Amino acid sequence: MPSLAAISDATSNAAARAFVRSLNILLKYSRLYGPEHQRTQSQSAVAWKELSGAHPAAGGNGLLVGVTGTQLLLDGVPLDAGTAEKSLAQLLNGAGVASIHFSREVGEEDLARLVRAFVEAAAKSANLSERLKNEFNSGAIKVSQVRFIQHEEGDVVAPMLAHLAAQSLGENASELQSWLQDPHKLLQMIAAAEGAGKAASGTNGEEFNASAGGQAADAVVCACGMGDEIAALRAISMLAQFGGEGGNASGGAEAAKEKIAELPLDTQDALRAALVTFAGSADHQPDRPMLLQLAEHLTIRFALERFERGDLRVNAVREMLDRMAREMESLRKVLNAREESMTRAGLTIENHAEVLDRQFWAAMPEKGKRSVLLSPDAWCIPPRNIADYVTELLQRNQPEEAERVLSNYAGCIQSSEPEARLKTAHGLTQMAAMIGGFPQVLQQSMALAGEQLVHETDPEMQRSVSSCFVRLSQEAVGRRKYVAVQQALAAVDCVEQKLPELGAHLRSRLGLHDRLPEFIAEALRTAQPPADLLEMLRCVPQAAAEKCVRHFETCVRREDCERVIAVMQQLGPAALEYLRQQLTAELPEQAVLSVGLLSRLDPGLLERALPSRMRGWRGMYQDTAIRQLAAGASPARGNLLLKLLDYADPMLLPQLIDEIGISGDRGASARLMTLAFDEAGNEHGSYLQLKAVEALGRLRELKAESHLRLMVEGRHLWSWKHPRELRVASAQSLVMIDPAAQPFLVSKGFSPRELALGPLPVLQGCSWSRQRRYPRFLRGDGISGKLSTSKQDSKLEVSSLSLGGGLGKSDSALADGVAGLELHAGLYRVRAQVWLREEKPKQFSFEITGIELDDRSRLRRLLAGESSLLPAGLLQNPIAQSLRALR
């Protein structure tokens, strides 16, 4: 005979219901035709098949068929009261049977034995009852007989009722735990307990309906008071304690029913109604104890009913739930195996009051939720519940309603009740991420929190509201809600007026200054920044100006420089005043960074203040100031650069003269002509004279044309009057002033290639922040050299080179400043003084600040690709013409 445990688990509740009907038909056929008849055997096979299919759906405890009056129960759930069901119920009632339990180990022979007992003893119900009691008291099929009768004095039946119920539950000690985990079977225990209570108190002897079905459960009204609810919770806790003893299971069940029987009848009704509703619910959580879920269900049922009747305001609901949660702590301690495992795993356990809060909110109807959330008592609702409701509204495409809910909740932060303000502050802090999706609510929340912060005197309240304000502000900053950020800054300004220390503390925590570089970068990304972004930056002019200064320092393209200048112009007078203070009062390393922007925003101040300040600066800061002026590209910078000639380090004068030429300001021509053509007053050397000649060519100064021709043509008796390199520079400048002069220059011995390798003219619309002064050549073969400073010598590998300087990599780190350069070029060496600037670790750009004209001629030939580097003096000899012809 196959056992039930070996049968497939693929079953349904329909199979269990079908088995009850088949059992009724089988009993009728057995009585009419006898056990051996073909119809009886065929129906027996059908009943066995349906019983086998019903067991997996019934779970690990088997299948329980019960009866109360004319109503059949299947695992505590009422079956439809059809003719077949009523007939079987009458048969079981006549035999004194309360329930039949089919365990998972039941076999086909066990079912046949049960049918034979009903058929053979059918004539006398007393015999049938006795036989069922003797033969099916234990084993795979167990028949329970529970009768509720009126107790009379001296009658010993009532004291035995608890024993009978305990017997039905506790034949095996291990089964009590499973009964306490099954709501349907727990109903049987409560029914027995109530029956015992009625018998003991002299009530009538009518049978008790353990479960009147889903409709009856819905009709039960929880009309008991707070004390009865707590008593019911305590009864559930006692059940858990009995179930947790694990020792004398029968005694535990008997004691549990006695405790339940001692409860008031209203409390028993509430407990039974909650259990029936819970049994019919589909929201069971298998990983949590059933008794704990039942206690929560009972609590929520009571709280919701009182709230809907208007007995409680929503703020009192939480207090009541807190009290009832404390009553359930003992229950939770008994059933805390899951919580203990979570604790050992390092997981956080949710507070029981919060669990009840969430369940109460889930049970509240939609109309009630909306009414509460739009009322002044919205602060009573936990933030998580509000967030869930807002999410539902958004999913239903109701953003306006969601905004109303959040706006109303935010207004509670200015409630007259301290508790309301405190809870609202905490709630807004928790929901900041959600509120960030509603810009208007975000602005409103920060404005209200800022206003309330000024009026709060309690330190704890002040901390909570300030934390709320900071969190909302950080959300606005993170989401780039610039209007909301303006609101936050305005609120901080108001706080600072009355509470300076608190205001300063809040300003440092807003998170704005950490994200300000990103905002500046966004403003510089387009030619026309967003208006609300610029308005927000005006609220922090000093910080914004500081970031713009740093950004301007790193700009390498003209477009980027112009955008920084445009943003600074829109930041207002406060930002400009910051630049002025930085130039006039700060240390050189900060002051020099404002030069470029001030050259465009306040050139008058710069012309007055920079020369005197620059006099005391070290060379590296003077170099930075010159480069800043070049990046500023002010049309009037030539006059300022000319003034700086008297204040700058002599090593930087060639660079200054180059920038004067590139500025395009012909107002500086007179001073340049003195440097270029007044040989008696030129105390700075021939290289500075050459630079002045090139600058006049870039300026296209017509007054210099005749002087340049004389310099090109000037001769002594047997040689040229001026060095070859100076004549080449003069010829190149003459071509920039008058391109038609090139044939004349070729006739004087200058080749087109030689004339082309010279200073670059001023480029209109140059895309770089600083225009390159000379064409740069990339050397694939590499040029070796040596850098010498006052402290050390270092090898140099030159990667690119021009007449004005180049790029290279050294084998050691060097400081910015003056150094000696020696390049190896064929049989000769090129020596020069250079200004070093570190671009990357051990990688430098160098700018020539001093060089002999012969060395510059060698450098020119090296760049022109000539392999034979002749001394420059030889080119001034007429023999050079024949050498040139040979080539």
Image (spheres, helix red, strand yellow):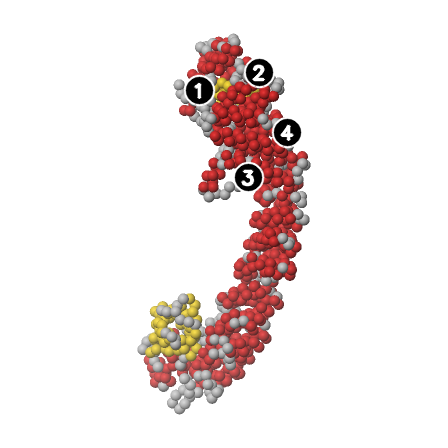
Q: CA distance from mark 3 to mark 1?
A: 42 Å
Q: Which residue does the numbered mark 3 point to in the structure image?
A: 352
Q: CA distance from mark 1 to mark 4?
A: 40 Å
Nearer-N-terminus badge (3/1)? 1
Question: Which SS class for mark 4?
Answer: loop
| Residue projecting furthest to the bottom | 717
| Residue projecting furthest to the front | 154
Q: Residues within 10 Å of mark 2 (few under 14, many from 20)?
A: few
Question: Which SS class for mark 3?
Answer: helix
Q: Quadrant of the N terminus?
A: top left
Nearer-N-terminus badge (2/3)? 2
Q: Which residue does the numbered mark 4 point to in the structure image?
A: 221
Q: Residue at x 57, y 29 (%)?
A: 275
Q: Which residue does the numbered mark 1 point to in the structure image?
A: 139
- Residue nearest the observer in this picture, 217 or 420: 420
Q: Residue at x 52, y 72 (%)?
A: 587
Question: What is the quadrant of residue 801 in the picture?
Answer: bottom left
Q: Residue at x 50, y 34 (%)?
A: 334
Asked whether the viewer can see residue 172, the reply is: yes
Q: CA distance from mark 4 to mark 2?
A: 37 Å
Q: CA distance from mark 2 to mark 1?
A: 34 Å
Nearer-N-terminus badge (3/4)? 4
Residue 580 in percent (x, y) is at 58, 71
Q: Which residue does the numbered mark 2 point to in the structure image?
A: 154
Please state which of the two labelled residues, at mark 3 or mark 4, is closer to the viewer.
3
- Residue nearest the observer in this picture, 215 or 554: 215
